[in-house]
Image: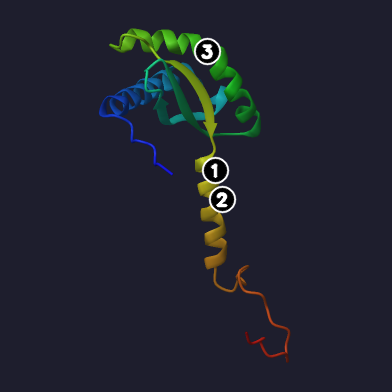
Amino acid sequence: MQTPKPPSRRLQRVSELLRREMSEIIRRDFAIEEVGLLTVNDVIVAPDLRTATAFIGFVGTKAQRNAAPEKLESRASRIQQMLGGHLRLKWTPVVKFVLDDSVERGNRVLAILEEIEKPGTPSPLSSPQPPGNPPASP
């Protein structure tokens, strides 16, 4: 099985440029009280530079989490227009927004690790042996 080619230098540069510009637009145009704290974690641009997928990180309440995708999609054309005004590209990529929960998963893993490391807390990985019974040998 063949591994996919890494993106070209141009694609990497356009992805980083889009990420920076979208981060600034979202920071300026979206109130934290409305949709929580949104960050652009990554942008993947198609090889033809016509479409892009933006992975959006989120911190906030459940109500804000439910509202965030709707708000992003409703303002997608405005974000597209602003990107077109700030970027020097032949075509402005059409952006699709995807909520990225990798930060939440990372926080959950860290919380589990902290729970395991607490002194006096039994490890969930080790099963307690009943008193008087020797451990089973393989």
Mark found first going from the N terminus, 3 or 1: 3
Q: Name the residue under label 1.
A: 104
Q: Quadrant of residue 15?
A: top left
> Within 10 Å of the Cα at label 3, are there few (<14), some (14-19), or many (20+) other Cα atoms?
some
Marks 2 and 1, how far apart in space?
6 Å
Q: Image point 26% across, 29% down: which residue? A: 9
- Which amino acid type is shown beneath numbered disc 3? Arg
Q: What secondary structure is found at the residue carrying circle 3?
A: loop
Mark found first going from the N terminus, 2 or 3: 3
Marks counted in the figure total 3
Q: Is residue 44 left or right of residue 102?
A: left
Above or below, comparing residue 120 to residue 36 in the picture:
below
> Within 10 Å of the Cα at label 2, are there few (<14), some (14-19), or many (20+) other Cα atoms?
few
Discs 2, 3 touching: Cβ within 8 Å: no
Q: Image point 52% across, 67% down: which residue? A: 117
Marks 2 and 3, how far apart in space?
31 Å
Point out which mark residue 75 bears: 3
Above or below, comparing residue 124 to residue 88 in the picture:
below
Q: Quadrant of residue 132?
A: bottom right
Q: Image point 54% across, 38% down: which residue? A: 101
Q: Image point 50% across, 13% down: which residue? A: 76
- Which amino acid type is shown beneath numbered disc 2? Arg
Discs 3, 1 touching: Cβ within 8 Å: no
Q: Name the residue under label 2.
A: 108
What quarter of the picture does the C terminus occupy?
bottom right
Point out which mark residue 117 bears: none
Discs 2, 1 touching: Cβ within 8 Å: yes
Residue 7: x %, y % from top left: 33, 31
